Structure formats: C-alpha cells, structure tokens
Amino acid sequence: MILYPKYYCKRITDIDVNFLKENNIKALILDVDNTLIDIDKNFVEGLEEWHKNICNSGIKTIILSNSNKVDKVSKVAKVLGIEYIYFGTKPLKRGFKQAIEKLDLPPENIAAVGDQIFTDVIGANRCKLFPILVEPVSEKDLLITKWKRPIEEKIIKKYLKNK
Ligand SMILES: [Mg+2]
C-alpha cells in the first residue's frame, strides 16, 4: 500500500539501531520540518545524541527536505555534520534518486524518515525505500501542510488497525 509506512513511531529518536539492522537498513534519508525540528526551528530533544549513535553504528544519513529555505536546511545539516538536498520535490522521485545516488546503496537498504504521508511515505514507497513515519513534532503546521493532516490521521488509524 503506497500510503502506508513500514514503521510508525512518535519521534525520530525512537528509531532504534537494532531495529534498523534487523531490517537491513544501512542508511537514512531524513526529512527536516516537523521530523528533525519543530516549527520554531528547535531540534527534537536528544536528536544529536541519537544521530551520533546512528552514525557510530555505521548507518549513513542524508537530509532530503522539500523546503526551499536553504539557510534553514543547511544549518540543520551542519549541526549534524551531513550532506543535504533542499527543495526536494517529494513525493516526486527526483530528490530521492539524488539522495540514493549520494548514499551509494540499493534502495532496499535505505529508510526514508518523515512526518508526512503525501510527501515522505508516498515518495519512499515509489522509490522502493523503507518508509518510516513519525508524528509531526509541532502541533502547529505550515499552512501548506495543514489541510492534509486530518486525511493523514484517517490513513494512520486504518494502517494501525490492519498492521
Ligand atoms: Mg516534514
């Protein structure tokens, strides 16, 4: 099902290294808004420590954000010390393909983490990646995202029921 993630959790920091290894995941493609940072650009609690742990386990990471605000995206990438792609046009394949190329791994060994079904999950499924959906960090949303949330909630409910 193209709308469903393979894994769903509250925060990105809930993603466990052992879980990734069990599923043969060797790299993560990370969304920024509402996945790594909240609407006021604050980092998710414990993000840097979690990310260090991921990297120390030999799992690669890269940022793929739909945001066109290069300052914001590059700042987050710099703190984590990783590469980034901004204006990623998810759910189109273009940005994902770029990220896959940079990671230099088969898609089945890459998970894409994000908070939106209509961009992160659909795009990941289209590219045969392992989609991980997280709850949006902020209650508030950018206007462009707001209208999709009630629909997403319905899909998530159905997904959890059928799991
Ligand atoms: Mg997002």
Image (spheres, helix red, strand yellow):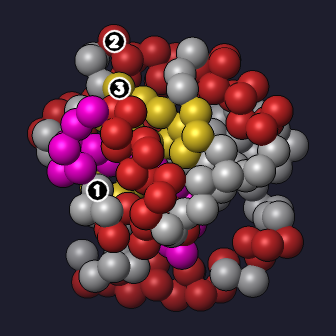
Amino acid of disc 2: Asn
Amino acid of disc 1: Leu
Q: Position of residue 72 (x, y in %)?
A: 79, 36
Is residue 127 found left or right of 82 in the rendered image?
Answer: left
Secondary element at image label 3: strand
Q: Position of residue 153 (x, y in %)?
A: 56, 80
Residue at figure coordinates x 28%, y 82% from the top left: 1
Report the front residue among 111 and 163: 111
Q: Which residue is mark 1?
A: 129
Q: Which residue is mark 2?
A: 56
Q: Earlier in the sequence, mark 1 or mark 3?
A: 3
**Which quadrant of the structure image shows residue 53?**
top left
Q: Which residue is mark 3?
A: 60
Magenta stretch, residue numbers: 104-118
Is residue 99 found left or right of 146 in the rendered image?
Answer: left
Report the front residue among 162 and 129: 129
